[in-house]
Amino acid sequence: MEEQKERVEDVYSSEKSTHSEHSAQKEHSHHEKNEDHMRTEHHKEKDHEKKQEHPKQVQPIPLAKIETKTIEVPKENDDTDLIDFSGITKKATTFFSDMKAKLKNKKKGEPTQSHAAREDSESKDTSSFDITTVISFSKKHAKILIPIALILIAILVSTHFRMMSSDLPITDQWAQNTIDTNLQNQLQNQIAQQYPHLPQANREALVRQELDTLYTDNADQIASQKMQLSSQFKDAFKDENGDTYLLAIDPYLWYSEARNVVNHGHLGDTIIDGESYFSLRDGRLDKKASVQLHPYIGAYLFKFLNFFNSNISLMRAMFLLPAIIIALSLIPCFLIARKIAGNIGGFFAALFLAINGPLLSRTPAGFADTDPYNVFFPLLILWLFIEAYTSTKTRQQVMYTTLGGFGVGLYSATWPGWSFAFLLPLGVLIAAIGVKAVLQFVKQKKVGDVTRLQHYKKEVLLFITLIVTSGLFVSIFQNFNVWWSSFTRPIRFITLKSVGVKSIWPNVLTTVAEFNTTSFGNIIGQMGGNLLFALAIIGVILSFVVKAKNGKREYVYAILLLAWLASTAYAFTKGLRFAILIAPPFALSVGVGIGLIYNKASKWLTDAIKLPDIAGKIVVVLLFGLLLIQPLAAAQNIAINEVPSMNDQWYNTLTKIKNDAPDSVTTSWWDFGHWFVAISERRVTFDGGDQGERIHWVGRTLQTDSEEEAIGILRMLNCVQETAPHTLDEFTGDGLRSVKMLYDVFPLNREEARTKYIENGLSAEQAAVMIETTHCTNLLPNYYITSQDMIGKAGVWGHFGSWDFERATMFQNVNGVPRQQGVTYLQNTFGMSEADANAQYTEIQTANADRWIAPWPGYLGGQRSCQRLSETEHRCIGNVNNQQLSMIVDTELLDIRIEGNDNVKPNSLVYPTATDVLEKKLDGETVGFSLALIPNGANFDFIIADPLQVASTFTKLYFYNGHGMKCFEAFDDVRQVSGGRILTWKVDYQCMQSGSVLLERAN
């Protein structure tokens, strides 16, 4: 036993003071953040960004040896500490005995107790309640209480799963995994040292045996260690108030604008010509604030909650908002399904919506994006539409439709794709008129009777009312053009991601993960599988036979469900983000199917099998309840893995930028732009809601191997963002020529650039205008961030950075035109021969524009270690296209040999010198990738990358720590809890840096 304890102390021994210092540093850091970070009402307030996209799980860091102490197990309580239920039992027995006696006496007509006896009895039962009164009240108001109870159950289930993100339960698993790995590794090392000749299988068996013994003998210590480590993980995802960061990236835009509402009364932070502008977005140009209801709702929710709890922060209020909106959405969901299929249908519809996987992944607490409104408003609008359609009174029809129009107006101020919730009921009304006309013709066999307006009076009234009221309210919340353009929006939606057709510039939507397309089979899978899908279809079919109060069949339910399902399923195929749009009609259809089957099945059990009515109903409900097992398990898995993308390291990095200069601009890939605005409160080049043509320019700064070109582009963006090529277009009238001219001047200084503009055909006056767009002198401090996540995104920013404007121009002008016209254009514009032009024309007609115009150059894996063979030779083993390759790198001859295949070589080798990073093109047949050697002590690490990426600015800044770079000054270098680095650079436009740094990996 003593040996086991010594072994445990070896395993767990660590610098307790290190943990104390970490805590003290974090407390000090948080104190600084508390002083420096703008807070709303003296309180501080996660956007993703996706993804990413659904937020990815952070991997646990290696466990340092942490000293632990044995926690004594609490002693069991004495019997005297237990709750004595005897008194309660006695009171309950007396209460029911007295009640029975009272009822018996009353039935016999016996005299009641004396006044004194009654007083004594009442005094004894002051803590009791009259259960008969409760039962009587419940029965009397069952039509109201049962729906309320069922809605509350669905809300509680929804809130339970959505609020799990606040407590970060996944950190318990991380802690356990880290402890398991740490203990196992240390035991493996110990046993390998003690028994070096023992077979591997025997070693592993011994490790398992010792590990089991450790866990058995030291359960309390390990439990304490797990709790401590889990707490450390949690702290890395919480601010100084103890509030969990918002989960994703996009929520930080709304947080910033909500903060503006609280501090300035509008969405921006400044007023220009009477309009609101947000000066931190779109570089130094200031971005006009668009109409958006979401930040106002967040701001006023904060004010409301702050009235009851003055310690709540704006960030916490925004964190709670998605859970609240989804909870409210369950009410109209229940009411719609209840209208069609009763309480059971409503209950299951609300419950399936609450735990819908795609919806839950986009609307947990902390994912404070606009997605919840895409559930709430369509359900609200269509519930009001159904109430209007099924009402028999004209006044109520107009009232409900007007409220629906008001809902359309509100919806238009929360999400650009609002129009489907407006067009859908209009389409349903037209379809309802068509169904009525067919039925009327079948019945009367007279065309004249079918055309009488009186048969369609209700539909026409609702149609006109909805058109008028929605137009009015959308015009109020947005403007009339927004409402008018809604009628053509479906056509624009179909061409959502077209590129190289109307413009030579790339379209960012082709690379946004949320807009990745999917198959219909994947839709079924994400909605819960074939069984639930079949049940939804059954629900739609059965809704055709639902009858109204007058005994006539109400076809509008089936038309609505069918149209809603079909339209949103199509939207799903256009982008994964639109998965949430299908969640409401799918849940409704499933609920309606269950409700209608329940009504028939429970009646059949009562009539055919002679089960009691209540027993038959319970049996059917329990059977349908089995359908919830898999969705509940999926919801649990989704909820438990929700983790903020933001962490303390990102927060501290951005706070450091904030404290370094009062006005500056931060440039990186757009994903984290909203963070830069929200936390650093400084300008950003572009973000998730404002990319434009900067996706090419910033992508090029990362992808180019020319530092002078990168600095020239950054200077242009600092001056005027992306407006320079369009200013130049006014002088050249040719977009391709303008881009080429800009690339000519980027590497030049101000006077050289002026001369080059004139040489390229501009007048002196035009050159003077252009010089202020590309070489202005009033530059803002510029921070440039390269982070670990950008390695995986390199194919995307490399694609935009390597965008070929010649090919884009060809595609724009040749695709879809007659052959002779296209061939002539290629010959005249690009000097092609007739044969080459014909071949190019044919290629363009069949090509995917996005992939034909530019490649997707990225990194093939991360940084790995090479094996040292000699002073000059190293073996580097990597995976390329799922094939393992062993490459022998000769550092003296600067050559690479692929073992087993001497006939081919990588395209190039990148290597460092004392003051630079150079690339050597290799001779012979190449394989399509390159290799970069990175010094690591006496050995080398390596990366495999696309030839267009291997010597890029990003490679030099991130993998070579800025070695050889003259225009980027190291500003900050931190490692996240996930292990990835964040390197921040300060752009030196004078390029005065030494360019020589210590080539070692950061600790």
Image (tube, grey):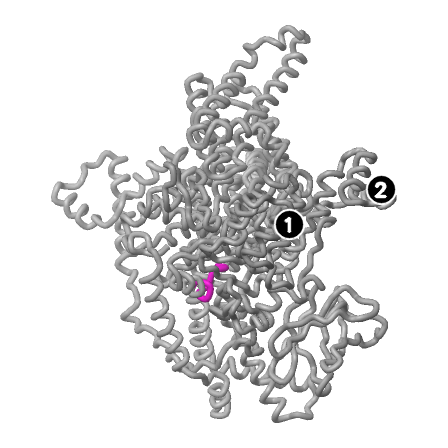
- In the image, taking residue 260 as reference, residue 974 lies left or right, namely right
Q: What stretch of residues is rendered in magenta?
A: 644-651
- In the picture of the structure, the residue carrying the numbered disc 1 is 759
Which is nearer the eye, 212 or 832? 832
Q: Is residue 647 magenta?
A: yes
Please tell me whether residue 709 is drawn above or below residue 969 in the rendered image: above
Q: Residue at x 74, y 66 (%)?
A: 929
Dot 1 surroundings within 10 Å: few (below 14), some, or many (20 or more)?
few
The answer to which image quadrant residue 723 occupies is top right
What is the x, y in percent for residue 73? 38, 78
What is the x, y in percent for residue 125? 22, 48
Q: Specify whether residue 465 is in view.
A: yes
Which is nearer the eye, 644 or 279? 279
- Disc 1 marks which amino acid? Glu
Residue extending farthest to the left is: 116
- In the image, taking residue 496 as reference, residue 458 lies left or right, namely left
Q: Label 2: state its secondary structure.
A: helix
What is the x, y in percent for residue 134? 32, 40
Q: Is residue 18 magenta?
A: no
Q: Label 1: state its secondary structure.
A: helix
What is the x, y in percent for residue 684? 47, 54
- Disc 2 marks which amino acid? Asn
Q: Residue at x 57, y 50 (%)?
A: 694
Q: Residue at x 77, y 64 (%)?
A: 928
- In the picture of the structure, the residue carrying the numbered disc 2 is 838
- In the image, taking residue 343 as reference, residue 239 lies left or right, namely left
Dot 2 surroundings within 10 Å: few (below 14), some, or many (20 or more)?
some
Which is nearer the eye, 609 or 254? 254
- In the image, taking residue 571 as reference, residue 375 lies left or right, namely left
Label whose residue precedes the other's in the sequence (1 or 2): 1
